[in-house]
Amino acid sequence: MQTIAIGTTNQAKVAAVREVFDPDRYTLIPTNVPSGVSAQPLSDEETRQGAINRAKHALEKEQADIGIGLEGGVMEIDGELWLCNWGALVDRDGAVIAASGARILLPAEVAKGIRSGRELGDVMAEYTGKCNIRHQEGAIGVFTNGHVDRAGMFRHIVQLLAGQYEFFCQNR
């Protein structure tokens, strides 16, 4: 049985990995590790790097076979802020696989809060009056009216990672 270290204890992110990697075939270990990027990543590049860093730190910390990192952030297009999300999978042989997921436009008032230096989760708590949105539906759940929640969005990314890993790495 292979061990997968998940570079977070965030419930939505851990649920996404559990839905893709069968716990009967893999030992899954959620673990707190640093992203090595800003608390609120502000670009695709920074968000992707945070996911890679989390995957590498989790792999090493837990001495796992595979490390998975998932990172949420925002990125700017034409002066507007868009939600972005990245994932990375690394293994003991040095493979690094990354994938990105859904993007949606953030309302101007949410973008204003982020531009003032606040994290999206904190802005969303104020915007919705709900606590712990980042561990539940996330901004994606709020702004898609529940059609896509945070675990589902990250599940898609984990599926992309798993598929690429199977295709490119398991047959080397």
Image (cartoon, rainbow, N blue to C red):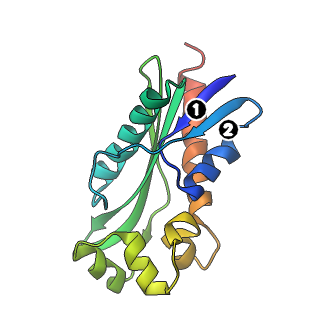
Q: Nearer the viewer, residue 32 or 45?
A: 32
Instruction: Return the x and y of residue 29 as percentages of the image width and height.
Output: 59, 37
Quarter of the image for the C terminus: give it: top right
Cβ–Cβ under 8 Å for marks 2 and 1: yes
The residue at the far top in this view is 172
Whole-angstrom CA distance, mark 2 to mark 1, is 9 Å
Residue at 27%, 61% (x, y): give it: 42
Of tags 2 and 1, the one toward the viewer is: 1
The quadrant in which residue 72 appears is: bottom left
One can see residue 79 in this view: no
- Whether residue 139 is situated above or below residue 16 in the rendered picture: below
Say few, some or many: other residues with alpha carbon within 10 Å of mark 2 (under 14 / 14 to 19 / 20 or more): some
Q: Earlier in the sequence, mark 2 or mark 1?
A: 1
Q: Amino acid at mark 2?
A: Phe
One can see residue 115 in this view: yes
- Which residue in the structure is indicated by mark 1? 4
Residue at 54%, 48% (x, y): give it: 157
Residue at 73%, 37% (x, y): give it: 22
Instruction: Return the x and y of residue 54 as percentages of the image width and height.
Output: 40, 41
Quarter of the image for the N terminus: give it: top right
Residue at 41%, 66% (x, y): give it: 83
Answer with left or right where residue 158 lies relative to residue 86.
right
Q: Nearer the viewer, residue 146 or 55?
A: 55
The quadrant in which residue 21 appears is: top right
Tell me the SS state at disc 2: loop
Answer with left or right where residue 100 lies relative to residue 150.
left
Q: Amino acid at mark 1?
A: Ile
Q: Which mark is residue 21?
A: 2
- Whether residue 79 is situated above or below residue 26 in the rendered picture: below
